Amino acid sequence: MQRVSNLKKKDYSTSETEIFDAAEQFLGRTSNLMKILITHTPEIARWWLGFLVSIRQDGLGSNSDV
């Protein structure tokens, strides 16, 4: 089985670093899925982060303590 590789944070471009930092700020951490999306499809990672943040609000079934 082939593994999906991740880049290290120091190897990210400026836009990829922005997504990574935003994930840490809004979610409190950066999941492996976000790291993979940031590495391979930053446009989808940006969309996915916005989606996660929007559904993780109080009263919508899930929330973050961040």
Image (cartoon, helix red, strand yellow):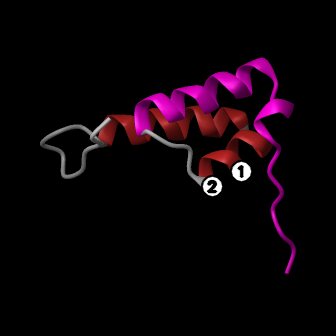
Residue 11 in picture, x, y percent from top left: 86, 33
Total labels: the figure holds 2
User: Residue 65's x, y, as percent?
Assistant: 27, 40
- Report whether 32 appears left or right of 12: left
Q: Position of residue 31 (x, y in %)?
A: 56, 51
Can you identify the residue that label 1 sits on? 36
Residue in the picture at 70% in, 25% down: 17
Magenta span covers which residues? 1-27
Q: Mark 1: which amino acid? A: Ile
Tell me whether the residue at label 2 lies in contact with that at label 1, contact meaning CB atoms closer than 8 angstroms: yes
Q: Is residue 30 magenta?
A: no
Q: Is residue 2 above or below residue 9?
A: below
Query: Pointer 2: what residue?
Result: 32
Q: In the displayed image of the protein, which residue is found farthest to the left? A: 59
Which residue is located at x 58 percent, y 27 percent? 21
Q: What residue sits 81% from the left and 42% below the top?
A: 8
Q: Is residue 25 magenta?
A: yes
